[in-house]
Image (cartoon, helix red, strand yellow):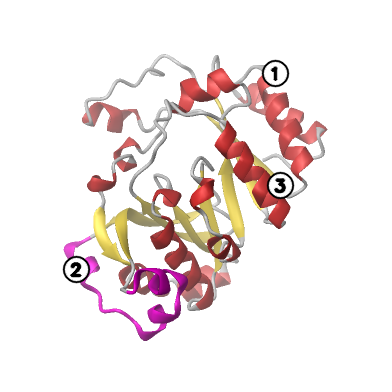
Amino acid sequence: MTVLLGAHTARAAATPAAAATPAAAATRRPSEGSVHSWDLSTGVDGPGTRFVTFLSGCPLTCLYCHNPDTWKMRNGKRTSADAVIAEAAKYRTFIAASGGGATVSGGEPLLQPVFAGELLHRMKHELGLHTALDTSGFLGVRATDALLRDADLVLLDIKSWDRETYRKVTGRPLRPTLDFAQRLADLGKEVHLRFVLVPGLTDAPENIEGVAAFAAGLGNVSRVDVLPFHKLGEGKWQALDMNFTLHDTPSPDAEQVAAAKAVFEARGLTAV
């Protein structure tokens, strides 16, 4: 149930509590950001039912991205943190009863670190919700320690272990994501790792084993989501007049997914 933003959302009045938040202290004004949409989801953005805020803008250009319309920040709606918090508050009782929480996603939320930090802080401290940051880790250096303290969980994508494949998939180098993953481990921050299984691209056994060995060595990865590649976002690529190069790539079958999960499980990780 994606709810696209209306014009009224950017005009919500600032709340007194906002003045005490890290973002307000840094900017000396109510925090605003570029928001693509928000949604209520279950099972894919953290535990339980989640209020997910999708921020606009992403430095990666993943070949299988199902939301390429979030890549450019200008395509989002300039929105106040107050408006997002007010919307999330409508569902707080329902979310809490489900054991859920709030997730800040994208795009790449760390492209807007002040705004992302404001949302995480207020979801956690004002609404009392479990919080999650969904990130590729490429811009992990932009996440302050304060921001990470306000994220109870980090959903971290490691899209490939092979460096050439990673750059082919994302257009960016892998090293910043690995450095961020190690920082999260040093902080003892709980991580759910995500790995997209793409036949002919990321499914080489040595590639999966590399991700699994690295994740197991961190000591803070409580779950690995092996996500089967799909083409549900191809229509968006076409609408944006972009070439979807994976058009002829099939989704992995159940046996391929099970084999990939087994690699992670062999390293003592919980794979789903």
Residue 205 is marked as 1
Image point (43%, 66%), residue name: 119
Regarding mark 2 in the picture, which secondary structure is present there? helix
Cα separation between marks 2 and 1: 50 Å
Residue annotated with mark 3: 221
Residue annotated with mark 2: 8
Question: Residue 148 in the image: x percent, y percent?
Answer: 57, 60
Magenta-colored segment: predominant secondary structure: helix
Magenta segment range? 6-28
Image point (51%, 28%), residue name: 229
Q: Nearer the viewer, residue 1 or 236?
A: 236
Regarding mark 3 in the picture, which secondary structure is present there? strand
Q: Is residue 241 above or below residue 70?
A: above
Residue 72 shows up from this direction: yes
Compare marks 1 and 3 and give the one earlier in the sequence: 1
Cα separation between marks 1 and 3: 20 Å
Name the quadrant containing residue 40: bottom left
Kind of residue at disc 3: Val
Image point (49%, 44%), residue name: 139
The verdict on residue 11 being magenta is: yes
Residue 192 is marked as none
